[in-house]
Amino acid sequence: MIRDEIGVGNVTFNSYSSHNLYGNYASLFDNVDNLNAASFHEIRSGSPTGDWGFGITLPTTYNISSLILDGRNDCCTNRIENIVIRLYSCGTLVYSAPAISSSTTGDTTVSIPNIRADEIRLVVPNGGNTGGAQGVINFSELDVIGSD
Ligand SMILES: [Ca+2]
Ligand SMILES: [Ca+2]
């Protein structure tokens, strides 16, 4: 949806108790299974006690039905484990998916029951770690599936 319909230039990215490093936000939507430092990294900042991660604000509300995270092919696929996808509408939390519990070099799909939202956050709750006890979210490509 973001890559092919909305356009990555028409969404806004925000960091929450974290900062972007190496691959930038646009690298999640460049249709490339990026490796190494070209892959997207979001690094936990300090010692937060709440959610840390990043959000994507859409230009209007959409019905969101799934997110597909493509893991790196070279290493570190477990850096999506423990991510919780939260959906917001006008700043109000409207849905939280179960935490991602496994990972692969290929696609990990998180199904969402067609929730209407204008912000998608990928966060780790309670200041926690991703897989391998790391404070980094790291993967290569993100597909957001939804409709108007
Ligand atoms: Ca991959
Ligand atoms: Ca990519």
Image: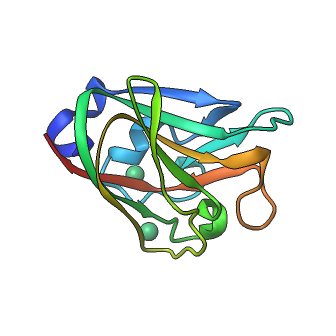
- Quadrant of the rendered image containing residue 62: top left
Vertical position of residue 17 compared to residue 65: above or below: above
Q: Position of residue 119 (x, y in %)?
A: 40, 33
112 on left or right of 42: left
94 on left or right of 50: left
Q: Position of residue 134 (x, y in %)?
A: 78, 56
Front residue (pair 3, 75): 3
137 on left or right of 11: right
Q: Position of residue 32 (x, y in %)?
A: 35, 55
Front residue (pair 4, 50): 50
Q: Residue at x 19, y 34 (%)?
A: 6
Q: Residue at x 52, y 26 (%)?
A: 14
Q: Residue at x 46, y 56 (%)?
A: 140
Q: Position of residue 23 (x, y in %)?
A: 53, 42
Q: Residue at x 39, y 37 (%)?
A: 26
Q: Using the rendered image of the protein, determine whether residue 75 is visible from the camera's viewpoint.
A: no
Q: Using the rendered image of the protein, determine whether residue 105 is visible from the camera's viewpoint.
A: yes
52 on left or right of 112: right
Vertical position of residue 95 compared to residue 81: above or below: above
> In this figure, which colouring scheme has been used for the structure?
rainbow
Which residue is outermost to the right?
47
Vertical position of residue 34 compared to residue 29: above or below: below
- How many numbered marks, from 0 up? 0
Q: Quadrant of ligand 1?
A: bottom left
